[in-house]
Each structure stands twice: as structure tokens, then as C-alpha cells.
Amino acid sequence: MHALIIVDIQYDFLPGGALAVADGDAVIPVINHIQGDYELVVATQDWHPAGHHSFASSHPDHKPFATIDLNGLDQVLWPDHCIRGTEGARLSNQLDTKHIEAVFRKGTNPTIDSYSGFFDNGKRKRTGLAGYLRDRDVTAVSVCGLAADYCVYFTAMDALQLGFEACILGDAVRPIDALAYAEKQEAFIKQGGQIVIG
Ligand code: VGL
Ligand code: ZN
């Protein structure tokens, strides 16, 4: 069974959003076009409580995009984004959601960030996605969405580590930082992942 994981197609990551990814909206028609090709489609949703410790606003002495140590983990400080229940946290209306069987929310613990759809960044708590996929006899996943260098990358890497075959759909992702994404693509391939284009 081959599943599609659609990562964080939320207004705050789209043009005009609080943490907009350049050209992020370009992935939506691509994702809509391919969903029907998969036996299972699931999605993730960044879902932070207000005052999340990954927000620069929670650290008045630091600016957005600075990196700090947060409880022993490197943490990029983000603009406030994807606050649960807000418009910015909603999945885009442009995304075809009729194939999506389950949505896994992440980043809900105020003290730790969560890029991967599987675990928080300290791997302390699971979201349930791995168990869900195994329960559905999934052996391979394709990962798409936003942002390529954060939530897509960490979701795809964790999928490999959990024993799934994994690829990143290169035409259906956009990065926050292109250089960081280039490095992460290399790391992903080194771990046995594939970047699929076209
Ligand atoms: C993401 C930064 C902070 C993402 C989420 O979806 O890639 N990036 N929270
Ligand atoms: Zn976030």
C-alpha cells in the first residue's frame, strides 16, 4: 500500500500568510492532480497553541529566524503562525480534501516544536501517524507540501527511519530556504530516500 502524505497546506504557509513560503500556492494544483493516484491520502496540520515556545514573540530578546537552544534542541524562532483555530491554521480551500482520510495535527505541545508529521523534534511523543499507516498496511509513502526544508523533509526522513520506503515529490514542495533544502535533499538521498520529479 502506497500513501500520499500532504504536509501543512495551511494559509500561514501560503503567499500572504504569517510564514509564507515563496510560490507555496504553486504546489496545490499539483497535489490535487495526483491525489487520485494513491491508495491512501493523509495530511498533516501545524497546530500551535498561542504563545508557543517556537515563536520569536515568546522570546522578546530575539528576532524571528534567529536560532536558540530550546530545552537542549536547536530551535529556529518563527513568526507566530498556525495558531490552532485561526484562519492561518486552516487547510487551504484550494486543496482538494475529498481524498484525505485523516489529518494529523502537530506542534500542539507549547514547549517543543514538531516539524515531522510523526514525532515532535525531540522524538518524545508520537502523533499516531506511524501506527495509522502500519494499520493500513502502508509500506511506502510519498511526501509533498510545505515547507520542503522543514516539515516535508523531517516527515520524509522519519518515514525512512520508521522503515517505510519514502520519496519527496519535488514538483509538489517549496522550501523556506533553497540552500537549506539542497543540503537536506542530499541527506535524504543518503538515507535511502528518493526525490521524484515529474
Ligand atoms: C513549518 C516552520 C515552523 C513547516 C512549521 O510546516 O515546514 N516550518 N512550523
Ligand atoms: Zn510551526
Image (cartoon, rainbow, N blue to C red):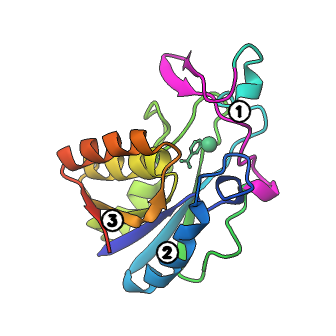
Residue type, mark 3 in image: Val
* Label of residue 141 in the image: 3
Q: Residue at x 52, y 80 (%)?
A: 32
Residue type beneath disc 1: His
**What type is the residue that disc 2 sits on?**
Ile
Q: Residues within 10 Å of mark 3 (few under 14, many from 20)?
A: many
* Figure check: 143 above or below 4: above
The quarter of the image that holds ligand 1 is: top right
Span of residues in magenta: 63-88
Q: In the rendering, at what x and y percent does residue 183 appear? A: 32, 40
Mark 2 against mark 3, which lies toward the viewer?
A: 2
Residue 16: x and y in percent read 75, 56
Q: Is residue 17 left or right of residue 181?
A: right
* Numbered label attached to residue 52: 1
Give the Cα separation between the discs numbered 2 and 3: 14 Å
Look at the picture and state if 86 lies above or below 123.
below
Q: Is mark 1 within 8 Å of ligand 2?
A: yes
> For numbered disc 1, what is the local secondary structure?
loop
Mark 2 vs 3, N-terminal side:
2
